[in-house]
Amino acid sequence: MEDNKDNERTEIFSERVRAGKRTYFFDVKATRSNDYYLTITESKRRYKDDGFFYEKHKIFLYKEDFNKFVKALNESIGYVKDELMPDVDFEAFDNEDEDARDNASHGVAASANSELNWD
């Protein structure tokens, strides 16, 4: 039987974000030719008659699209915060999140209002 390693992609970095009933995974991976890309996975635990399963949705984001993706994400979130929900204190949500507090104590949490900059 052929070794499965040839079909796997090397994982370089992984970050997990728990968000209520969902968990998001941000995984940086490398191809065989050491080209890097990001996978963003949304995982939701679902129940059915014989137990539970995880429903997953995955996005592959390639380096040539990083800047466009981040720009669109920042603009979309900014629109919701500024135009649709200006009275909501979004920073208060961070205070409720235990993972954010744990990560902040280790120096890896970013401010909710900071924009991503991939220049």
Image (cartoon, rainbow, N blue to C red):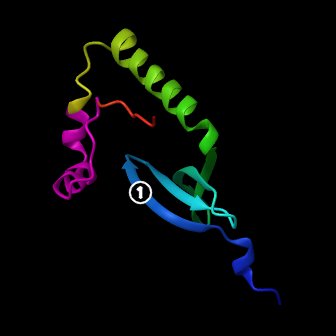
Residue that badge 1 annotates: 15
In terms of depth relative to the viewer, which is nearer, 118 or 19? 118
Residue 78: image quadrant is: top left
Where in the figure is residue 113, as x and y percent of width and height?
A: 28, 29
Give the quadrant of the C terminus: top left
Q: Say whether residue 97 is magenta.
A: yes
In terms of depth relative to the viewer, which is nearer, 82 or 72? 72
For badge 1, the amino acid type reads Glu
In terms of depth relative to the viewer, which is nearer, 23 or 51? 23
Where in the figure is residue 95, as x and y percent of width and height?
A: 18, 40
Q: What's the residue at 58%, 52% (across, down)? A: 39
Q: Vertically, is 51 above or below 101?
A: below
Q: Vertically, is 109 above or below 50?
A: above
Q: Which residues are magenta?
A: 92-113
Give the quadrant of the N terminus: bottom right
Q: What's the residue at 52%, 51% (across, down)? A: 44
Label 1: how many residues lie within 10 Å, few (<14), some (14-19) or many (20+)? few
Report the side of 35 relative to 22 (left or right).
right
